[in-house]
Image: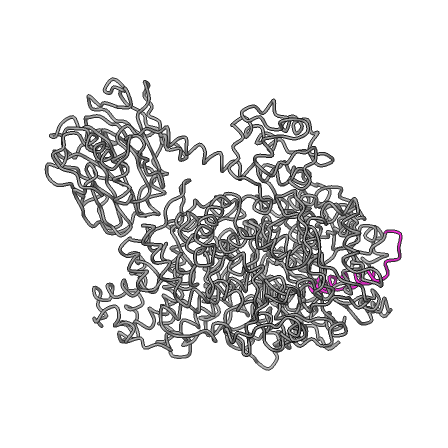
Amino acid sequence: MNHRKITRRTVLRGLGGFTVGLPLLEEMLTTRAHGAAIKQPVPVRAFNLFFGLGIPAPLQNEGFRGVLEPLKPLSDKLLIMRNVDQVRCDQSGLNAHFDGASGAFTATAPNGSAKSGGASIDQLVRRAHHPEGLPGNQLTTLVAGTFFRRSRISRYIHSYNPDGTIAASMQEKPRDVFDRVFGKVTLDGNGKDEKQRRLKRSVLDAVVDQYRHYTGANSPLGQTSKSRLKDHLDRIRELEQRAFARENQTGKGAQIPPLPPRSKLKHEGQADPGGQGIDMKLEELTEEWRLMADLYAMAIRTDRVRFGSLTFLAAGERIRMTGDYHYEGRKIFSFDDARQLNASGDKGCSHEWWHQFSEKGENKALRAHAHMKMNEVAYFLKALDDKDSVETNGKTILENSLITISTESGDGRHNNVKRELSGVFHAISGAGGRFKTGEIMDIGAEGIDVYNTMLTTMGSKERLGPEKREHTAIEGIRA
Amino acid sequence: MMPFHDNLPDPLKAACIFLFLAGTALCSAQQRATEGILAFYDFSEKSGKVIKDRSGVEPSLDLEIENPQSVSLSEGVLRVHRPTRIRSLKAATKIRDAVSQSGEITVEAWIHPANTSQSGPARILTISKNTTERNFTLGQDGNRVDARLRTTRTSKNGMPSTASSKGSLKAELTHLIYTRDLAGQSTIYINGRQTGRKSISGNTSNWNSSFHLSLANEDSSNRPWEGSYHLIAIYGRALSADEIGQNFRAGANAGSTELLARIRIAEQSRFFHREIAPLMVQHCLECHDTSSSKGKLDLSQKSAAMAGGKEGRAIIPGNGSRSLLWQMVADNDMPEDREPLSQREKASLKKWIDDGAHWPVEMIDPLAYKSGPNANNRFVRRLTVPEYIETVRAILGVDIAEQARKLLPADLRADGFSNTAYNLGVDLKHVEAYSRLASIAVQKMDVTKFAARFSSNRSLTQKPMRAHIAKLGKWILRGPLEEHEINTFRGISTAVAANGGSFDQAMTYILEAMLQSPRFIYLMEKQNKSSTPLPVSDHEMASRISYIIWGAPPDLQLMEAAEKKQLSDPSVAEQEVRRMLADPRAHRQSKHFAYEWLHLERLKHLNPDRKKYPAWNNLLADDMIAETIAFFHEIAWQEKRPLADLFNAQFTYATPRLAQHYRFAREQNNSPAINTGNASGRKGLTRYDLSKIPSRGGLLTHGSFLTIGGDSASMVTRGLFILHDLLRGSIKDPPPGTDTTPIPSSPGQSQRAIAQVRINDKSCGGCHQKFEPLAFGLERYDGLGTFKKFDRFKNLLREDGELVLPGDAKRIAYQSSAELMDILAGNERVAENITWKLTQFALGRPLDGPDIPVVKAIHALALENGGNYPETMVAITLSDLVRMKQPENALPGAK
């Protein structure tokens, strides 16, 4: 594997003195490198980490002895929750992967092919802590992922606004994430000519004025439309920040991570040829994912991002994987899905191992795939738990943030192994000591109650699910 | 409108005479305009001190008589003998909300003034605080009517006012109407005739939300009016001259009975669509639709549901307690083996039956109710990438297609189309692209020449520059600019002037700002915050029509029609639509629809297993797209055939490569195809007559469709596509634990035989029989659409079958794929579904329950006129879905 991990040190060391006009340096300084002197409070953060296809309930019961093994090194910083049902996401007549992917982190069934039934946890936490919006130098939400199946947006996007629309556009290649977080904005005519810059600024001011009008008290628009234009206004403000950043923010030291290499994997339409699946080597997948995970973690560490979601493989992903999978020096499995399934097209994809799951069977291939997924989930979590991620309170970003880890749960009931998607899986980090960690807990409750308990604990007054529903707090998860 | 003589003593009588002459027997038969009504008082109270608002528009704005001894109430007339005040119990917020956003108002009064000497003006009706602060006042000033309207350009007191001509008001029963339209025309009509007019500029966004509505006096009780009230109506829009005549002819006694009846039906329809139909879909239709109808009860069809099942009548309208449906649900006996209904759902069901079980549609269409509440909140819609490109081209005359496609992120599909408003969000890349594209567009154009189209004045000074901006802005932003917008753009020219810049530089930067304006990038409309549908304004209508027909902005002619307020006249709107349909842009837009509807983009990424299909050539995918587009175009435009013919038309287009793939050459030996020459598009595309090639004919025999089933030509996938996308049917997921791995063909066992096993299976057959037989007729086409009579195991492939169409229990047999195509082409639901899809694409949002009756009406009207593409587009653009603005639903949690 050629991928070299991107650390904050890598960034600060500077690679080639590449400078950009964005307010990156200041945010970087608020974290550990200079944090001790500044003593910034630890920010509230919430992220949803999604992996496709789930882990069948019986395999979860094996704890860290089985497919959850890669999470073991992080076990004292996670609360793994079993026996959480998502029954209200199980909609008759809709695709179970799609239902469940919408349900993860929202506890609601989808409401259109590209909408969830309501907000996701990360977005309600954001609204609670930043009701007037985030500062212009921060992204409101970062949505990214390494995934291939894309017939429906909800398969791979996991941050939603209260109206169920996506909270941010998907960045699906490492370079996309790089551009979105660290990239320089180019505006024609925004050069060194001061007069021209001033006039360009005046154009942008006029544009901002109009968006303000249409999102303000005298707007002739309804709430839904105002909210849409408010998003647009936020993006314009971000553009302003980047395009008209002060000169002193482009000076020495404001280096950015190295520009990631071009993606070697298939993306966009080519990645999902009519649901038929694609061929992929394990190494290609993990190399791109780890680069993506590093960039996302870097965005968090530099405080460019506090809310969002990251996806490792879509709901109902279809890949014909090949390659040897090793974990801690031992070979776990040789993937060769099409040959092992003796099928081509969609029927030769790893997805089929989930169809063929048998409680009494060996499920070797499924176990290997699930183990590999947990290993990659752990990779991202560890990137927020290293020494570069220690914050002013002495804890790591992983410990200080709310990171929810889940998967599609469309058939609703985690413990009905007859269902293709019995693998409802939930784990969370401690969110700055708000939640218990270091346990595998049998919850025995609905996801909506678990999520709403998390929201209450995170200081949100908004709730997921039907307004009139009587919520049951799951006290056991609180620290 | 017919003229009336001023000296007619009794206008009501005159109205009746008019109606008699017009051949109308009864005065009362004349209907009043109801669209956009906000408050309505018919004074039908017999006693008491509260006058009810009978508009049916919530919240109700009832009035209270301050001193009942000063008035008398009888036979629908409120007589005010002595000074008093009749004031709304709460602030007139609903009127303020509607008028402040529409910029339009109509106040109608049937009154009989006590004399022609009272003045002040004496308040006939007012929404105000005192003698110096108001939103609106309609008053009597001697023998004239005086109307004061507050706008951003009039005073707090609504001055200057609009007055009727001297002597126009008499002490007799009088029909009085005041209207103000968005263009600022303020008009007074007395007895159907215009008697005063003035331009009142500005907008109504500054209306105060705390003012009450009062009759017969100022809110501060010092401008009394005496006389009789017969009827008062307030609308959130300017009624047209025809509607004013219509209301006048309806007379002073056109009470609220009919209005209330219509409102009640509308309310019941809403309740059915929001509460009952979704409940039935979720809990009942699994077992009680037309094909299942357990216990012989079909709850999906109105007539069948009312007839009942084996156990008798299930629904007794008006009596929930005696209705078997309610009893079973209340006792949790139904749904069988499923979660019972919630208490709220049970209450809704009971209320619905008790209220008469109003059922506004013939059939409950499950797909229309799949989404939950707020699924279709109306959004401003961002222009799609193609729309943006065409808008820049049409407005500025420059082509930035290449740069726009490179810089703007692609629009993603949602609910079948990539123009679905809710999914057209923006990312930083969009905002950056809009900024850069604005610069690129302006650099490409001759700004001097362009600016001169709107004014020859090249001054940077205040007055001429403002006028220039107003004219330029109206064209670029597709409608008149408001004051604050002119101020904003004027700010740029000031900055340029302050920096020693030129007029052309100012124009360049103003154009750049306009190209990034929300009014350019989004289809913006003042949204309807009231609880009743309102007509769209003429400029909004112009944009709606042009983006529906062309995917591009209004042209000059359409803008002029909007400017003259002609588009609210359906006949003018129709003329415009027909003119626009003759434009090549309409053809391009129709192809865009076909591309999206049939998801032809999918073919760009087709990647079949080369071991299974060694002869596959990626260029064939483009040939398949070209075939379908050319075929659609010919049906829609060249032949203008009913759109249902898409399923069995006996011709197609193919490149030589595709013709070879389809094995046309071999079949030609037996049934020669006729090469009728080039049609359009892809090089080498040739028209083939298929009348003698029974294996081909219609969309479903195109490679673009047949590849949907994947390499294995899955019957399940093809059948589900036909069921979902062509028949708008729905089906449940497979039960838990079902191994959905398809069984491969083997010697002696074709895919058809395997499918038959599934259909015959007790647990699978219930669903599989609904969709797999739809694909039986396609078994002879392999995964890439090549026609074969035997599979690779030498199993004979069949093309006969038997199907059940959604909403119909009858089995229909067919012997060949051609017969299957004829059945589909002749099926009303298939035809209606094309209208449904066209309507969805036109509106840029998924359709839902309340849209069903309108779509049916669109379809019926289109069919009457041939059922072809142009007529369907005419019917869509003239329908209420386009002409009217629906209230925006409240969005929980939206900031």
Q: Residue furthest bottom?
A: A16
Q: Position of residue B265 (x, y in %)?
A: 45, 33
Above or below, B864 relative to B615: above
| Viewer-proximal residue among A260 and A392 | A260
Magenta-colored stretch includes residue A358:
no
| Res A388 → quadrant | bottom right
| Viewer-proximal residue among B187 and A116 | B187
> Does B71 sit left or right of A353 as displayed?
left
Q: Which residues, given as a range, are shown in magenta?
A: A359-384
Counting every numbered tag in the picture gives 0
Above or below, A168 relative to A250: above
Q: Position of residue B169 (x, y in %)?
A: 14, 34
| Viewer-proximal residue among B687 and A203 | B687
Quadrant (top left, top right, bottom left, bottom right) of the N terminus of chain B: top left
For the question of whether residue B733 can be seen, the reply is yes
> Does B792 sit left or right of B787 as displayed?
right
Q: Position of residue B625 (x, y in %)?
A: 58, 69
Which residue is found at the position 65% from the left and 43% from the top? B810
Helix, strand or loop: magenta stretch = helix
Q: Position of residue A238 (x, y in %)?
A: 48, 64
| Viewer-proximal residue among A52 and A136 | A52
For the question of whether residue A395 can be seen, the reply is no
